[in-house]
Amino acid sequence: MYKEAIRPAWAEINLSNLEYNIKQIQAKIKDCGLIGIIKADAYGHGAIPVAQVLRENGCKTFAVATIPEAVELRKSGAKENIIVLGLSPDMYADTIVKYDITPVVCRSENAKAISDEAVKQGKTVEIMIIVDTGMGRIGYWADDIETALEDVSKIKAMPNIKIKGMLSHLSTADHKDKTYSYEQADKYKKFRAAFKEAGIELGFSTLANSASIMEIPEVHFDACRPGIILYGLYPSEEVDRSQLDLKPVMSVKANIVYLKEVDEGFSVGYGRKFISTKPTKIATLSLGYADGYPRPFSPHAEVIVNGVKAHLAGNICMDQCMVDVTDVPNVKLGDEVIIMGSDGVNSITAEDIANSTGTIVNEITCAFGQRLPKVYVK
């Protein structure tokens, strides 16, 4: 049991595996810059410790999703460039300037609010121009270059604003069929070329996400943005995993907090989904769906105890779950249980949980990272 975890359930973050993944990615992208994607508390792994490992491996730019995430990094002592990938409303311009945050921009009105605040504070703010090449979220529409040229020209003329770079995002790079990704890349390049022809410099160029780092070297450009692959997980079942060797960074573990032996016909959990068919030994763990263990996983869920896999007994509760440990050798109170991870022989992966619940691995690690204490190992 990790006493420092405070709870008898925790997420174990292997920083050595994180460093291994970073080095594999760097070897793959060669001289292309690396922007460490550490949004959502580094996909549940802890943004500040992950940033430190990235820093130690030469990463000079981080990207997050929200202003509070960027502020947290600054307050932790981060000196690197920090890009906020989500739009930052005008009312937060003072915070952007104060903490030297690099926002993405796709409206001159938004840029003016930032420019005005930068003048007020006597600073210069670097911004990223974001372009929608087919993701459908935010950004100048790549098919309307004329409107974008007009609007960015206004931004270019604003005081205390510097255009640092241009980015877009690929929506299907993790699919086997890359046709749409190449269409997006073509739009990206045409957009950038039009600005160059008009005499507007858009700074450095970044388009590649995790899947395209692996399989589309043509879009690596000046900087790549690895996300889920940093954490040792693949973007989908369709990518060619031979392109990149990765090690999972997060494991989830718990200790048995209660053991009971029950007779045949004993029901366990909400809805009585488990009813014993023989004398049975039930273990209780202090971990549930509020900790990121998805309730729909209940019928399929197994855990690893003392070298063997054991099935969950009944539905996962909000804060607890129960395991049928009848066939587990030498089981006792306090034994360590692997919810997600490996004991060297058996394994339960984020992919196993995601595939059984109809989601993606990103959601699994983000969810486990919200409430569980994190224990860092190296």
Image: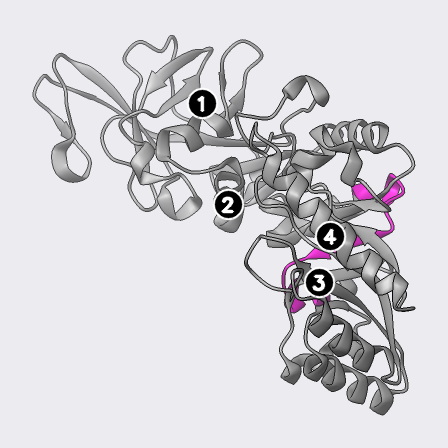
Question: Which residue bears the numbered disc 2?
Answer: 372
Task: Give the alpha-carbon distance from disc 3 to disc 2, as whole Å.
Answer: 34 Å
Mark closer to the chain start, 1 or 3: 3
Q: Residue furthest left?
A: 265
Discs 1, 2 touching: Cβ within 8 Å = no
The mark closer to the camera, 1 or 4, is 4
Q: What residue does disc 4 label?
A: 188
Residue that badge 3 annotates? 130
Between disc 1 and disc 3, the foreground one is: 3
Instruction: Say above or below: 377 vs 289.
Output: above
Q: Considering only vertical position in the picture, is 53 above or below 142?
A: above
- The alpha-carbon separation of the residues under discs 1 and 2 comes to 18 Å
Q: Secondary structure at mark 4?
A: helix
> Dot 3, how many residues are within 10 Å of its Cα: few (below 14), some (14-19), or many (20+)?
many
Q: Is residue 217 visible?
A: yes
According to the picture, the residue beneath numbered tag 1 turns out to be 335
Instruction: Give yes or no for residue 58 being in the magenta stretch.
Output: yes
Label 1 Cα neighbours within 10 Å, binned few <14 / some 14-19 / many ≥20? some
Disc 2 element: loop
Q: Nearer the viewer, mark 4 or mark 3?
A: 4
Question: What residue sits 54% from the left and 9% below the top?
Answer: 345
Q: Is residue 137 above or below residue 117?
A: above
